Image (cartoon, grey):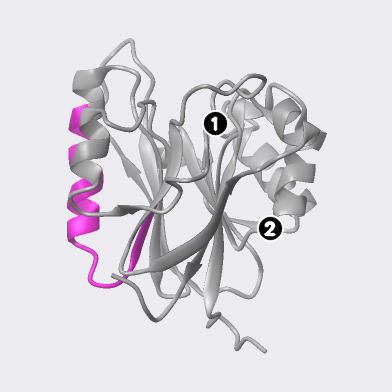
Amino acid sequence: GVEWGVPSSLRVLTANIHQLRDDRSAVVAVLRGAAPDVVAIQEPPRGPLGRLRLRRLARDAGLRVAVGGGGARTTALLVRDGLEVLGARAVALPWTPGRTRRGIALADVAGVRVMSVHLSLHPAERALHLGRVLLLVGATAGPCVVAGDLNERPGGPSWDRLLLHLRDATAASGPTYPAHEPRSRIDAVLVAGLDADGAEVVPGEAARRASDHLPVVVDVHLGRGR
């Protein structure tokens, strides 16, 4: 058995849900089917009812919102009940007028710092925001997970910087975008101080209907790693 809040592994899923503009029931089906412990969300629903819609989505998927709304902007974190969550917070990122306001959703889940990130489409802004992400990674004493939509393919400058500090746990998972005919791997889970296995792009028709990105899931193992 697993003690309250002290599992031996965490199943981490990252999903850009396109503000629930596509097929909400498919998003719920994907989240239920993948049975994650932690979900790094990008593009949660926004607007006056955004937080309520995110809470309802989490509930329907058997999860709860750890971080959503406010400075998290285009990110959120969902967790399953029974996991200890500490230090949950939103980190707003510098904003350029005329561009999307972005943030980071961050929490310590069962002793692992998990960050949901959604990097900018603009290279200079992406580099600036990534600097903030890496400051948070550097300030983390224990194991760390950075999961999200990097808006960049492997081999790009953001990846190069991330891989100086983290390991790509989803290197073998395959392309994620666009969902209907994926060609680019721009969604990923990176880890420090953890072993990981079982990485895959979530298969099936529901995943293709849920969003314009395919979600990625991986199992990270606590208590060991590099």
Earlier-in-chain disc, 1 versus 2? 2
The image shows residue 198 at horizontal and vertical percentages of 56, 58
The image shows residue 31 at horizontal and vertical percentages of 71, 48
Residue 204, numbered label: none
The residue shown at (76%, 32%) is 24
From this view, report whether residue 102 is shown above or below residue 117. above
From this view, report whether residue 178 is shown above or below residue 202. above
Q: Is residue 74 visible?
A: yes
The residue shown at (52%, 43%) is 173
Pointer 1 residue? 176
Residue 138 magenta-highlighted: yes
The image shows residue 126 at horizontal and vertical percentages of 26, 27
Q: Quadrant of residue 224?
A: bottom left
Question: Is most of the magenta stretch helix, strand or loop?
Answer: helix
Q: Quadrant of the N terminus?
A: bottom right
| Residue type at numbered disc 2 | Leu
Q: Which of the two residues, 124 or 204, is positioned nearer the viewer here?
A: 204
The residue shown at (38%, 20%) is 100
Residue 184 magenta-highlighted: no
The residue shown at (55%, 80%) is 7
Pointer 2 residue? 63
